[in-house]
Image (spheres, rainbow, N blue to C red):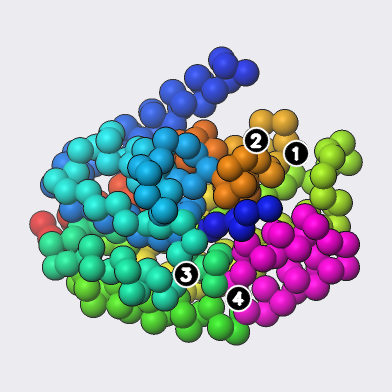
Amino acid sequence: MKIPRLVASAVCAVSLSAAAITAATTPAYASTTNYVALGDSYSSGNGAGSYDGSSCERSSNAYASKWAAAHSPASFSFVACSGARTADVRNNQLSALNSGTTLASITIGGNDAGFADVMQTCVLSSDSTCVSAVNNAENTMRTTLPGSLSSLYDAMRAKAPSARFVVLDYPHLYIITSFCIGLSNTKRNALNAAADVLDGVISTAASNAGFTFADVRNQFKGHELCSGDNWLNSVTWPIGDSYHPTALGQSSGYLPAFTSAAGAALAHSHAKDS
């Protein structure tokens, strides 16, 4: 999701752990997989650095790139784009899918709910104004987003009828503590609650479509903003990186969640075809 303009040993241990999970949960036949990575900035890797130079801010540190680098699929098409909404995926990304696609991943829905505007409001305005913006976004999540997701998922399936689809959600932004400068806990609680509403809508839509759902909230638990071991950017520069996973958030948060879900999805497909 795109925001408008406005030690070392622990990291090593976490990285090694993530690598072990990746190796243990991905089947050998991943090398025959034709993989397409769709979605918004949480999939493109906005916030993780090492971008490809395009306006989509695709990063070599994104979970999709990391998975492809580790498992050498038969093909890898990385079309996720910062700022994408469901309509953008349908209009600009689905051409990457075809009858030969066997695995696809996606994060989508946050921009449909107005993530960037909500974050700008909560950073710059009062508690009550922030909560009102969050409530409006939650209403959109409950009323409009389900139909948008259903339509998109149907289109994805039509383009790639043999693929296994993994839908990932969004982490909580904050751990709630009194010892952290910045937004008030009223705002932080409201934003975390909105993430739960959004993730619930995404989970239900994925289940209805027969897609695999991967929940990243537990992966990020203890590494939210204000945790002291953040896997998310706070307000930073470039401003578009703000409130997105860092490189470590991608490799230790999203990557293990996707790897586990992709391994299960591919195993199911392989067993079905055997």
Residue at screen point 49% across, 52% down: 42
45 or 226, which lies in front? Answer: 45
Report the amino acid beneath label 1. Answer: Cys
What's the amino acid at mark 2?
Answer: Asn
Q: Name the residue under label 4.
A: 141
Write down the residue under mark 3: 85
Label 3: how many Cα within 10 Å (few below 14, some 14–19, many 20+): many
Q: Residues within 10 Å of mark 1 (few under 14, many from 20)?
A: many
| Spatial separation of the CA atoms under disc 1 and disc 4 | 26 Å
Q: What residue type is labelled 4?
A: Met
Closer to the chain start, of discs 3 and 2, is 3
Q: Are marks 2 and 1 in contact (CB under 8 Å)?
A: yes
Q: Earlier in the sequence, mark 3 or mark 1?
A: 3
Checking the image for residue 230, the label placed there is: 2
Q: Which of 87 and 240 is in front in this view?
A: 240
Task: Return the residue at label 1.
Answer: 226
Disc 2 to disc 1, C-alpha distance:
7 Å
* Residue at 56%, 15% in the rendered image: 9
Would residue 195 be seen by someone viewing this image from the given angle? yes
The Cα atoms of the two marked residues, 2 and 4, are separated by: 27 Å
The answer to whether 167 appears left or right of 274 in the picture is right
Disc 4 residue crowd, few under 14, some 14–19, many 20+, Cα 10 Å: many
